[in-house]
Image: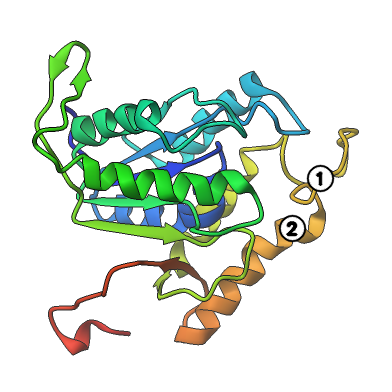
Amino acid sequence: MMKVDILAIGAHPDDVELSCAGTLAKEIGAGKSVAILDFTKGELGTRGNADIRQKEAANAAEILGVTTRINLGFADGFFQNDRKHQDKIVSYIRHLQPEMVLCNAISDRHPDHGRAATLVAESCFLSGLQKMETFYEGKSQYAWRPKQLYHYIQWNNTTPDFVVDIGTEMKVKLAAVKAYKSQFYDSESTAPETPISTENFLNSIKYRAADLGRLIGVDYAEGFTTSRLIGVNSIGDLL
């Protein structure tokens, strides 16, 4: 068992960096341990390839300072919300025992994102069932259910249920995103252009964070949605 405080899950390498890297950097800076779980290697992506993206993911993880990063090797574009995939995810949830899970947007442009969101949510629930048997490295595991599950915002301009101030972490977020050089804007690249390889998309990472920050009176923020009611210990906890 390698317990972490937060487990960030993405359907593809770079999902986490684009959407919640600032929040992760902030929690790591506060002493929290963070793991990243990538479902696929992004092998269907127009630019780059699986090997390049694995190296880029490792570089991004180092920039953020995460405890560990794991790729499950699911099929990009074709993984399903079924028992086979749920068993694999539950085994890692029970192995890492996160208090909080951050994962893909519930509905988004890429069909993998919404499917991953549902798969993670159901796996988090199943992970807490004592009679569901899973194994990690040949050893039987105990039930474990994360206390919080939040969905980060991706391509669609989803209205967040809450936002996190990442004013001092914006530089780290951008550095982690730019670790994926094969995927994002590069004036010297001769690779085919995609919706995320444009200069406008790269700029949107900063101006979207700036707009969310504006709404709460800070420089930059990241947004999240939740299917559960949010509770606070004191009304003074709200910014």
Q: Secondary structure at mark 2?
A: helix
Tag shown at residue 234: none
Residue projecting furthest to the right: 190
Is residue 123 among what the camera can see? Answer: yes
Instruction: In this rendered view, identify the residue nearer to me: 62 or 124.
Output: 124
Residue type at mark 2 is Phe
How crowded pointer 2 is (Cα within 10 Å; few <14, some 14-19, many 20+) is rated as: some
Which quadrant is the N terminus positioned in? top left
Badge nearest the viewer, 2 or 1: 1
Which quadrant is the C terminus positioned in? bottom left
Q: What separation in Å lies between label 2 and label 1 (alpha carbons)? A: 10 Å
Labels 2 and 1 touching (C-beta < 8 A) = no
Question: Residue visible at 13% across and 15% down?
Answer: 139
Q: Secondary structure at mark 1?
A: loop
Residue type at mark 1 is Thr
Residue 195: x, y in percent? 78, 51
Determine whether, in the image, residue 176 is placed left or right of residue 90: right
Marks 2 and 1, the one that precedes in the sequence: 1
Asked which quadrant contains residue 206, the reply is: bottom right
Determine whether, in the image, residue 218 is placed left or right of residue 14: left
Tag shown at residue 201: 2
Question: Residue visible at 19% across and 33% down?
Answer: 94
Q: Which residue is mark 1?
A: 194
Is residue 17 among what the camera can see? Answer: no
Determine whether, in the image, residue 197 is placed left or right of residue 157: right
Question: Residue visible at 62% across and 28% down?
Answer: 53
